[in-house]
Image (tube, coloured by chain):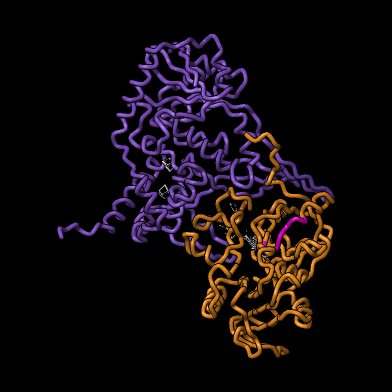
Chain colours: A purple, B orange
Amino acid sequence: MRAKVIDRAEVLKIVDLLRKDYEVLAPFCGRGRDTFFDIVTDENRDQIQIHVPNPYYPPKRFVLPHIERLLKIEQHDHTLRVEPTYDEEPRAIFGIRSCDVAGIYHLDRFYLGGKFRDIYYEKRRKNLFLVNMVCTDPELDIDEECFCVCADTGPAARDHFDLQLMDLGAEFMVVAGSARGEALLAHPLFKNGTAEHLEKRRRILEEARGHFKKANSWFAATIRYMTQDRILEKTWEEVGHRCLECGGCTYVCPACTCFSVTDRQVGPGEIERIRLWDSCALGGFTRMAGGFNPRRAVHDRRNRRFFRKLAHYFIQRELSMACVGCGRCVAVCHGDVGMPSVVEMIRRATAANEKHEPVTNA
Amino acid sequence: MNPSPTPNVFLPKIAILDRVDSEIDDVKTFYWHFKDPADQEAFRVFRPGQFAQVSIFGVGEFPASLPPSPTENEYFFTIRQVGSVTAALHQLKPGAVFGVRGPYGNGFPMEEYYGRNLVFVAGGIGLIPLRSCIVYALHFRKKYKKIQIFYGSRVPKDLLYLETLRKWQKTEGFECHLTVDRSTEGWNGPVGVVGSLFKKPGVSVPVENTVAFVCGPPIMFRFVIRDLKTMGFEDVNIVSTLERYMKCGVGKCGHCCIGVAYVCVDGPVFTYAQIQKLGEEI
Ligand SMILES: Cc1cc2nc3c(=O)[nH]c(=O)nc-3n(C[C@H](O)[C@H](O)[C@H](O)COP(=O)(O)OP(=O)(O)OC[C@H]3O[C@@H](n4cnc5c(N)ncnc54)[C@H](O)[C@@H]3O)c2cc1C
Ligand code: SF4
Ligand code: SF4
Ligand code: FES
């Protein structure tokens, strides 16, 4: 991958450059901890945040909106027109974090892989340019909840971005991850780097990794227990008792994929078929006609979320687990059953239950 | 990313309703064709056991089995009215337009069963998906050995496709046994659960080289499986279809998942051996 450098004062000029061809989204601060991605305009351009706590509302919505129209339907007495509506707006996300880059890559394999490709996702994704910002600031970028180091997705993405920026102090290092990214690097804004820059990058990255003190999510053991069906029902019940069924964890998750489809009347004879994010935490998710629900108990549904994310079968299918370690579910869950807590609950309970026979001398 | 254009799997094709037959209470059969002859032709590839997504625009979409066999020349659905979309379909009159997309799902591997005995066991509207296999198997009668149909409903008036069943009962070359849980005026056939037919005098169900198809309500499913196992059937030789709430039919929405399976693409047809390995109760 090719790398260049850019002066600190010039960094937002990358946004200006991108705005010629794309609608650019960048992180901004709200009130308190609140941060969000918003469309960059001439007015807000200078408020773009370089180092910032990752917004809870994941940038996943730029490839899979919370609510999107699939079909526009016009039905009058003798006519029926059904027309798909696509969003092909070229968009760039400036400052997407590494975990979310991995999240989008996970969605790529899910929506564009398998037997059927999702054309709505594909059209948005094709037109999406990703400028990844490496998380290096221990105060702003790296939250207590972050555990990308355990999920092997950060703090610096290794792949699947178009451009990657990393703060070296007076300058930023810029790495191209795609042909489109490389084309942009040809602009005179970017200067050639030196061996010193590379050394500095290595050092800063090493330091950044040291800031994830609390992140120790033992995925490996849990994946094994999950796949081998060794997790006790009791453990799931404990997780279930703590879940309030708000659905929050699924709505903030950059790697969750489930949705629902419904029709809505928008005018006389005018109908929209829309799809919207849905959540396996909610009771109606699997309820069938007649009221039968195969996952009636809360803990069966919680089980589902973690099984889907961690079972080896799915990891093999999508080449990664469906958790990128962003920590959002940790932050939003009222019952403290976000991903790392559950991984830990499972690991402890299962290990305790399967204590090895004490070894004795013959 | 893939250079070949991606078809829109969410876009239903326009269908026109030809006629409606009442079957039993709340269940009707809807005969239809695609408006575009190209769609009509393209749909012929469907296999027994597959399903389609049916759209009533403005109300919604639901999955429905394809009861016709690909060897027949007509498309139809047999639908029980249970909720909003099925009720809206029940109100349509001939000439009405609606949407269909598919076919989806794996279907039964009927060619793999060449040279074997086929035992069909259905309860209630579980006969809908099996109708396709039965008609298919009878069309290719010589490819299969013994063919037996065992079908039961709660009361005689709940027997689906009764005319077809009566015809089948009179046809040589295969057996068609009916039963009801409770007899009513005019019924002179057997009374009892569907599994009781296996032990009826004169009936002999071969176990060697046989595939058993089982479709019906959960309770019937459990009892029939128990009977078949007692008779010596192996789990791999029992096939069924699973029903789940479905929103997309194409493996994306996540509603139909059971354990490791997305029922809409990995199923709905599973062997009993597979069902037990899904990693979640059914
Ligand atoms: C592969 C497959 C094949 C099938 N084949 C056939 C067939 O051949 N014939 C047939 O008759 N049926 C068949 N079915 C069943 C059929 O799909 C359902 O009966 C149908 O989806 C019901 O749709 P509906 O809109 O009428 O009901 P709805 O009113 O939409 O109810 C359907 C589901 O929506 C949900 N729902 C409704 N209201 C609410 C609410 N207020 N809150 C939360 N959730 C709600 C429930 O989960 C309910 O189970 C098949 C199903 C599958 C999966
Ligand atoms: S955020 Fe927590 S409480 Fe809410 S649905 Fe998820 S696990 Fe349950
Ligand atoms: S499961 Fe939790 S930590 Fe993992 S990607 Fe989803 S929201 Fe982030
Ligand atoms: S019905 Fe949507 S994934 Fe199976």
Between residue B272 and residue B28, name the one nearer to us. B272
Q: Tell me: residue B164, above or below residue A116.
A: below
Image coords of residue B74 (percent x, y): 81, 63
Q: Whole-percent x and y of residue B91?
A: 75, 63
At 66% from the left edge and 64% from the top edge, which residue is drawn? Answer: B112
Q: Is residue B174 visible?
A: yes
Q: Is residue A157 magenta?
A: no
Quadrant of residue B115 within the rendered picture: bottom right
Viewed as shown, does residue A73 lie left or right of A224? right
* Residue at 74%, 45% in the rendered image: A73
Q: Quadrant of residue B7?
A: top right
Q: Residue A53's spot in the image, x, y percent?
A: 40, 29
User: Magenta residues?
Assistant: B44-49
Q: Nearer the viewer, residue B19 or A35?
A: B19
Q: Is residue B179 above or below residue A223?
A: below
The residue sitting at the left extreme is: A361
Task: Give the number of callouts.
Answer: 0
Q: Main secondary structure of the magenta part?
A: loop
The answer to whether residue B219 of the structure is visible from this angle is no
Q: Is residue B157 above or below residue A233?
A: below
Taking depth in this image into account, of B76 and A106 the one nearest to the observer is A106
Is B48 covered by the magenta stretch?
A: yes
Image position of B19 with respect to A263: above or below: below
Q: Which residue lies furthest to the front in this view?
A: A362
Figure quadrant of the C terminus of chain A: bottom left
Q: Residue at x 45, y 56 (%)?
A: A301
Residue B57 percent coordinates (x, y): 72, 51
